[in-house]
Amino acid sequence: MNLAHSHQPVRSAGQPWRAALAGGFGSVLEFYDFFVYSPLAVLVFADVFFPAQSPGAGALLALSTFAVGFIARPIGGLLAGHLGDRVGRRPMLVATFLFTGAVTFAVGLLPTYAQIGVWAPALLVTLRFLQGIGLGGEWGGAALLAVEHAPEHRRAFFGSLISASAPLGVILANGVVAVLTGTLTRSQLLAWGWRIPFLVSIVLVIVGLLLRMKVEETPEFARLRSANRPSPSPVLQVLRRHPRQILAVVAIHAGPTTVGFLSGTFLVGYAVKAMHLSPAVALTGTITGSVVHFVLTLLIGRFADRGGQRRFVSIGGAAIIVWAFPMFWLAGLGQVGALFCAFIGVAVVQAFISTPEPAFYASLFGPETRYSGMSIGYQTATIIGGGAGPLVIQALVDGSGGATWPASLYLAGVGVLVLVAALTVRTATAGRGEGAGGGAEGESGGGAGESAATVPPAEGATT
């Protein structure tokens, strides 16, 4: 008898699909909640919440409130990771989903600066911080719901359905904002139109909650719980035993986060303010890129199990380096077609890295600390790429008198980090097989057969 599979929980044929769709659909709504803030911060919030400032200072403050959400995300990752490794993936997914949805709805009810003065931006920053905490716990749970329910030889494919939720969330968020900016006058948008994207999210929350309530706990966590083996302190354990894996997740995810938010914030603002294009045109460019991102994610997901998750992430890192200069050059031409090409190029880079992320990151940690390790690394990277990235790039461009080559160098440096991390990090299964410390066997304390049952195979392996 093969001990590695003798006590596997019975998995219904449709459960992997239900888990991936529930996790993915919920993540679409979570990403919508978070990303709908991005174009509004650039286009509206400087006037609604910071009108006392100069236009440049108001825009910078609006982007700073955008960054606050990223600072909060690692906190959410720590909290949800600890509880997700202690009480289960499914309960945390429901909790973070409800929390983030409620906070997003509350943003739509906020009074403006004209109504309550400085309390308006203070409340905006507070809600943005809380929204970041909610989203910080979302991705790791959704990724594990899909990956740990999936057959071992199809983990990258089912994980890619979670990765596909990000471009869908961007499409939905920017689509709503594009419709508003295209149909409402500027005065209408500033008066009440900006509230609509936040308020309508409550309908989507209800649908997503119904989907997630129908999904079972993952087989791997159910096995840990039945054996009474969840770690009592998963965050401390993963920080102590797997710091290199966490740093690798940070370095890798900083790539798609940097280029993604560069596209959604800096390029949109650059197109509107420097190129004098309409907001609807700029947002249509981001939507076009997100459609390409979504399609490529589904295609790459079908090959990542056979071709190796590490290989696709490495290609994405190299692509960032290659694309760093052409992207800004295209955006600076002042032509709609060239701008759209810049958005599409960003989408291609993102797809190669983000598609295999759920399965690849899951392979770096044992199941007792997987939620914590993935969430800490992933959400910390969002500070570097999403929170600080647009601000650093804007500062580099402003400091060089409008030249974009310093920003291109910065972006290329991020690509180097992705490439080095992807090529050098060791998976938990590789560590076990090669006798290295920090593998899955070190966390479970079980024998080889038990470890093989609870840890996914190295990328590219099949069963």
Image (cartoon, grey):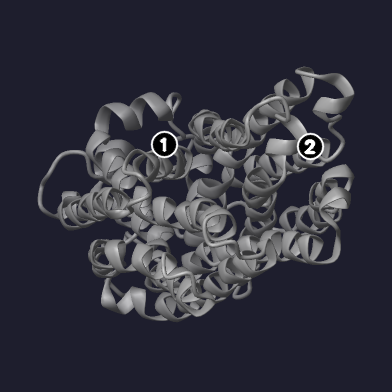
Residue 244 placement: quadrant: top left
Task: Give the amino acid type for the residue marked by disc 1 in the picture.
Answer: Thr
Under circle 1, the secondary element is helix
Residue 15 visible here: no
Left or right: residue 81 compared with residue 94: left
Other-residue count near label 1 (Cα within 10 Å), few / some / many at <14 / 14–19 / ≥20: many
Query: Which residue in the structure is indicated by mark 2?
Result: 107
* Residue located at (31% from left, 75% from top): 462
Percent from the top left, x then y, of residue 408?
Answer: 29, 55
Residue 214 placement: quadrant: bottom right
Percent from the top left, x then y, of residue 160?
Answer: 48, 68
Task: Give the amino acid type for the residue marked by disc 2 in the picture.
Answer: Val
Percent from the top left, x then y, of residue 178?
Answer: 73, 64
* Front label number (1 vs 2): 2
Query: Which residue in the structure is indicated by mark 1?
Result: 380
- Total labels drawn: 2
Earlier residue among tags 1 and 2: 2
Give the camera-side residue of 45 and 91. 45
Left or right: residue 350 compared with residue 90: left
* Residue located at (37% from left, 73% from top): 153
* Residue located at (60% from left, 38% from top): 59
19 lies above or below 299: above
Give the camera-side residue of 178 and 58. 58
Give the camera-side residue of 142 and 186. 186
Residue 138 visible here: yes
